[in-house]
Image (cartoon, coloured by chain):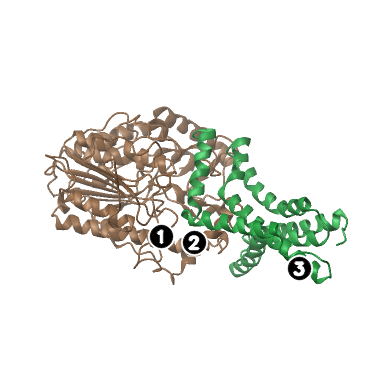
Chain colours: A green, B brown
């Protein structure tokens, strides 16, 4: 497997997903300004769907492509995390309107980010398998389903299923709030 | 008269109005006629029974009787038909826990101290239930308490205390584990509203009371879980609005993906389904609660208590469903601060089915119920009795009141305090936002902030003075 330069193996895959996320974000929120309701609804569906896919499933694309372009494991993870991190950070910045910096940082621990990280881990496991399958088709002698990938998939699926089964995730939110009170009191 | 002149005189009016309302309420219970107050023909019970029903997150316009395009609320409609509906009813703090404490104590949150959903009940003030128990009432608190703390509070004056602490006190729609007079108790009915209504009906019939209390007048505080998310309704109601024209009830700005937009991050609520579906389900939970209101009213009739029972239905706070690109509670928008409020007292109301336009507040509930019971209204209550307004549609009410909100993590709304008059709303934020000043007559949608405009600059000193006056009176 040839290792491409940093721009090709890291910036382009991560930048592609970020561009889709940014454009669909702007398109989605911008569509709400349209007077024509039918057009607004249609654009909202298109951009909303693209926005969701870019954040929730962008990891699969970034991880797989960066793998195929020779990125090291750390680079793949980092490239995959850029768009979700920016997406999540927007909310932390929004909280600064009402709260201090530490409380805003604590928001990174919210259950939504837990779900997102679980889905990212799942996609990294799948992405690794997909990438190696492509390499094998190209004639490289690699093991497609490595123990590490399978373990990542198993752990992430188990985390998703068990968190959902345990009160559909609501209990995670209760724990998150209890943690907040332990650290910051009532917040007032 | 200019709009600025219209607010003249408000400052001097606030306190005197409150005093007048308390005086008038006391006189009404004593059977005295004040000039200008209509006196109905029916005989007034010395100590009427009281049933106070509280909904959760119930918007003022989400009832058939308030003109909703498709929701079915025959119970609330009946109450409105046989009683009076307050079209300008508000909560003073748009968040569940402080709003509930305000209802119980008749005080602004700044006085009772339960400021957000993290703040525990603190026993700083006496609840109207305790005053009523001391006045010879059998009392019951049934349903959602929803104030944090270690378990439920110690309220030994209650004959019956049925509530839950499950999931931060939110409980669950089905098979909610209950705590009945301090003991863990499983639900007998599966759906929470049916369960709590059963307890209320039994209490009305004389069960679950202390020895010697079976014949006493009763006060039931019945607090429902609907319509708090996740919106789940029982069989027979779930899905009933599947084909409803939901878009006719929502602002045009929303779209199916919209649920998460309120926190700026789309798909925040993706696991909850589309926004339209959420709103349908919200309406279904209100209808599910209303079905229990019907059952309760029927039980009152069956027991022969209709003519000596004051029934009040209220919501703890409203909520935005897309207005101002906002979803939920907390903000000071009209959709959030307005609540449904209906009162039925056959001996008091000369014009059943009428609408009262005077501003009424959640902090008025405690003084109203004490007034109805002839129990006297404590001086530390900020609210005033609504009995004069219930009796007489022409009675004058308050001209201004105070909005309060303390930030509640992790919701993105800064702490604010404000004043709402019958025409203007002025809100000051502790950080993050410049003040809001709206002329609700010219701009009912609150789309044009007058703060900083020439018009706003003229209004501002009066609004600030009014706010300061209200703060001092708290």
The nearer-to-camera label among 1 and 2 is 1
Task: Name the residue located 28 percent from the left edge and 34 percent from the top edge.
Answer: B20
* Crowding at mark 1 (Cα within 10 Å: few <14, some 14-19, many 20+): many
The answer to whether one can see residue B354 in this image is no
Quadrant of image for the N terminus of chain A:
bottom right
Disc 2, SS: loop
The answer as to whether the residues below labels 1 and 2 share one chain is yes
Looking at the picture, does residue A70 appear above or below residue A137? above
Question: Front-most of B429 and A178?
Answer: A178
Looking at the picture, does residue B204 appear above or below residue B419? below
In this rendering, position of residue B34 left or right of residue B464: left
The answer as to whether the residues below labels 3 and 1 share one chain is no
Looking at the picture, does residue A42 appear above or below residue B392? below
Residue where numbered disc 1 is placed: B232
Question: Front-most of B77 and B13?
Answer: B77
Q: Which chain does tag 3 point to? A: A
Residue where numbered disc 3 is placed: A133
Task: Name the residue located 28 percent from the left edge and 40 percent from the top edge.
Answer: B182
Residue B41 percent location from the top left of the image = 13, 49
Residue where numbered disc 2 is placed: B250
Q: CA distance from mark 1 to mark 2?
A: 20 Å
* Crowding at mark 3 (Cα within 10 Å: few <14, some 14-19, many 20+): some
């Amino acid at each position: 497997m040839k290792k491409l330069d940093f721009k090709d193996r890291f910036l382009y895959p991560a930048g592609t997903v970020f561009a889709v996320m940014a454009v669909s974000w702007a398109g989605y929120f911008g569509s709400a300004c349209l007077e024509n309701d039918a057009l607004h609804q249609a654009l909202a569906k298109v951009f909303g769907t693209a926005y969701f896919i870019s954040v929730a499933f962008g990891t699969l694309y970034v991880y797989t492509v960066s793998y195929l372009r020779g990125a090291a494991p750390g680079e793949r993870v980092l490239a995959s995390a850029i768009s979700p991190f920016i997406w999540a950070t927007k909310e932390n910045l929004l909280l600064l309107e009402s709260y201090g910096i530490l409380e805003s940082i604590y928001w990174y621990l919210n259950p939504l980010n837990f779900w997102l990280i679980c889905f990212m881990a799942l996609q990294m496991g799948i992405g690794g398998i997909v990438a190696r399958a492509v390499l094998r088709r190209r004639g490289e002698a690699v093991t497609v389903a490595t123990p590490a990938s399978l373990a990542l998939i198993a752990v992430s699926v188990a985390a998703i299923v068990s968190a959902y089964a345990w009160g559909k995730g609501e209990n995670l939110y209760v724990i998150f709030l209890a943690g907040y009170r332990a650290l910051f009191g009532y917040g007032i | 008269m200019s709009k600025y002149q219209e607010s003249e005189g408000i400052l001097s009016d606030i306190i005197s109005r409150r005093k007048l309302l308390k005086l008038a309420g006391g006189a009404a219970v004593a059977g005295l006629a004040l000039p200008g107050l209509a006196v109905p023909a029916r005989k007034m019970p010395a100590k009427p029974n009281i049933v106070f029903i509280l909904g959760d997150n119930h918007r003022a316009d989400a009832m058939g009787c308030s003109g909703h395009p498709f929701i079915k609320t025959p119970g609330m409609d009946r109450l409105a038909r046989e009683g009076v509906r307050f079209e300008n009813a508000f909560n003073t703090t748009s968040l569940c826990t402080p709003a509930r404490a305000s209802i119980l104590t008749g005080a602004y949150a700044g006085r009772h101290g339960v400021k957000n959903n993290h703040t525990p009940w603190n026993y700083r003030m006496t609840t109207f239930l305790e005053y009523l128990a001391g006045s010879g009432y059998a009392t019951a608190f049934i349903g959602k308490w929803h104030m944090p703390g270690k378990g439920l509070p110690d309220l030994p004056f209650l004959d019956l205390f049925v509530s839950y602490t499950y999931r931060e006190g939110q409980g669950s729609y089905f098979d909610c584990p209950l705590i009945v007079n301090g003991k863990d108790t499983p639900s007998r009915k599966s759906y929470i509203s049916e369960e709590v209504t059963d307890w209320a009906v039994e209490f009305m019939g004389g069960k679950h009371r202390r020895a010697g209390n079976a014949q006493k007048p009763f006060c039931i505080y019945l607090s429902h879980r609907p319509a708090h998310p996740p919106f789940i309704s029982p069989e027979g109601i779930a899905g009933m609005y599947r084909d409803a024209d939901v878009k006719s009830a929502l602002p045009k700005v929303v779209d199916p993906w919209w649920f998460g937009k309120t926190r700026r991050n789309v798909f925040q609520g993706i696991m909850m389904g589309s926004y339209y579906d959420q709103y349908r389900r919200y309406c279904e939970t209100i209808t599910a609660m209303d079905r229990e209101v019907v059952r309760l009213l029927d039980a009152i009739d069956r027991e022969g208590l209709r003519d000596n029972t004051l029934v009040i239905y209220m919501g703890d706070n409203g909520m935005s469903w897309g207005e101002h690109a906002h979803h939920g509670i907390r903000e000071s928008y009209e959709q959030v601060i307005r609540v449904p409020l209906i009162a039925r007292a056959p001996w008091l109301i000369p014009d059943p089915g009428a609408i009262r336009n005077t501003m009424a507040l959640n902090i008025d509930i405690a003084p109203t119920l004490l007034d109805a019971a002839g129990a006297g209204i404590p001086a530390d209550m900020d609210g005033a009795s609504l009995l004069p307004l219930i009796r007489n549609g022409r009675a004058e009410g308050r001209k201004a009141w105070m909005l309060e909100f303390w930030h509640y993590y992790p919701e993105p709304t800064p702490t604010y305090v404000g004043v709402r008059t019958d025409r203007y709303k002025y809100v000051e934020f502790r950080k993050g936002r410049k003040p809001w000043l709206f002329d609700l007559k010219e701009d009912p949608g609150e789309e044009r902030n007058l703060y900083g405009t020439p018009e706003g600059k003229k209004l501002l000193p009066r609004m600030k003075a009014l706010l300061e006056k209200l703060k001092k009176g708290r």
